[in-house]
Amino acid sequence: MGLLVVGSIALDSVETPFGSNADALGGSATFFGYAATVFHPVLAVGVVGDDFPEVELQRLAERGVDLAGVERVAGESFRWKGKYSYDLRNRETLDTRLGVFADFEPRLPDAYRDAKLVFLGNIDPALQLKVLDQVRRPDLVACDTMNYWIQSERETLMALLERIDLLMVNDAEARQLSGDWNVYRAARWILQHGPRMVIIKQGEYGAVLVDETGIFYVPAFPLEEIRDPTGAGDAFAGGFMGHLARSGDLTHANLRRAMVFGATAGSFAVERFSVERFLEIGVAEFTARARAFSDLVHFDTDGMGDHDG
Ligand code: AMP
């Protein structure tokens, strides 16, 4: 199943209580690509400037990210600078420099247009729509967004919601979009405005998948060491969509498995800065951690009694 992503391919400068980096590989399409290619090749759509390190593009390509849809143009690459609080729960964006992204007009190579799975990474919803317009008959379209677009491009975002199957956002974004502080009511609000499924990510508290059949919960993997939360959401999306692409199975039971692979990818992303952790692991480590989730939540209902006194 062809798997397409559009998103930022960035140079990030990140400061956490546990270290910092400068102009390191980042961006929504990048984190997605590193996670998804554990399972399946990815067709990437994006833009980089002429300052973007060639070695990083080569590494992406070697992993199985097709860069035919990534334009290289004169100018500065997208740059993002962020700083995290001590508990890593909050982050402040210190600087966003769009660079070549400001004039980006996505153009899909013809071979991309038959992709069956599409992930619209966090960029201007008008660009997300332009990508969607060029895909012929996708089976599943998933989409991310952020506070900036919810506030400044609400109308376009609402039009986009009508055309997607799955919205993947974090709890703060779900609250902002729906105007409801309760994430489950926020999920219901989102389901009434287009998508048939919504995933709400809650950082160290896990993530929920909500659709008409109910709610499925996956915890966050318990890690003793977290260095940099950047890209966890995009990696989650990559693990989720990569598993769906490899299996070709879009049943609800398999979407639940995809949630576990998403949580697994997110957990690897945060263990190191940038995409470093993905360079150390392969499908075996990935699958072993995914399987370990079942022990985290499994318990035997026999012997619980009915406690009816
Ligand atoms: P996440 O931690 O999942 O929200 O993703 C962080 C990544 O998103 C970083 O690598 C940034 O380069 C990228 N990013 C931050 N702000 C934006 C934006 N306005 N548009 C596109 N990508 C962004």
Image: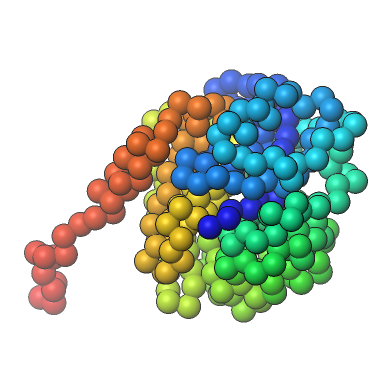
- Residue 226 vertical placement versus 101 (above, below): above
Q: Quadrant of the C terminus?
A: bottom left
Please state which of residues 161 and 146 is positioned toward the viewer in this rendering: 161
Residue 202 image point, x, y percent: 51, 52
Please state which of residues 309 and 299 is positioned toward the viewer in this rendering: 299
* Ligand 1, image quadrant it occupies: top right
Please state which of residues 80 and 276 is positioned toward the viewer in this rendering: 276
Q: Residue furthest front?
A: 111
Res 143 → quadrant:
bottom right
At x 30% / y 46%, what residue is drawn? Answer: 291
At x 59% / y 62%, what residue is drawn? Answer: 116
Res 95 → quadrant:
top right
Residue 283 visible from this viewpoint: yes
Residue 161 visible from this viewpoint: no
Q: Tell me: 292 left or right of 199.
A: left
Residue 193 image point, x, y percent: 66, 76
- Residue 153 vertical placement versus 220 (above, below): below
At x 36% / y 35%, what residue is drawn? Answer: 285
Please count the marks in the image. 0
Residue 294 image point, x, y percent: 28, 51
At x 50% / y 46%, what residue is drawn? Answer: 40
- Residue 248 vertical placement versus 233 (above, below): below
Q: Coloring scheme of the render?
A: rainbow
Residue 263 image point, x, y percent: 45, 48
Q: Tell me: 42 left or right of 240.
A: right
Res 275 → quadrant:
top right
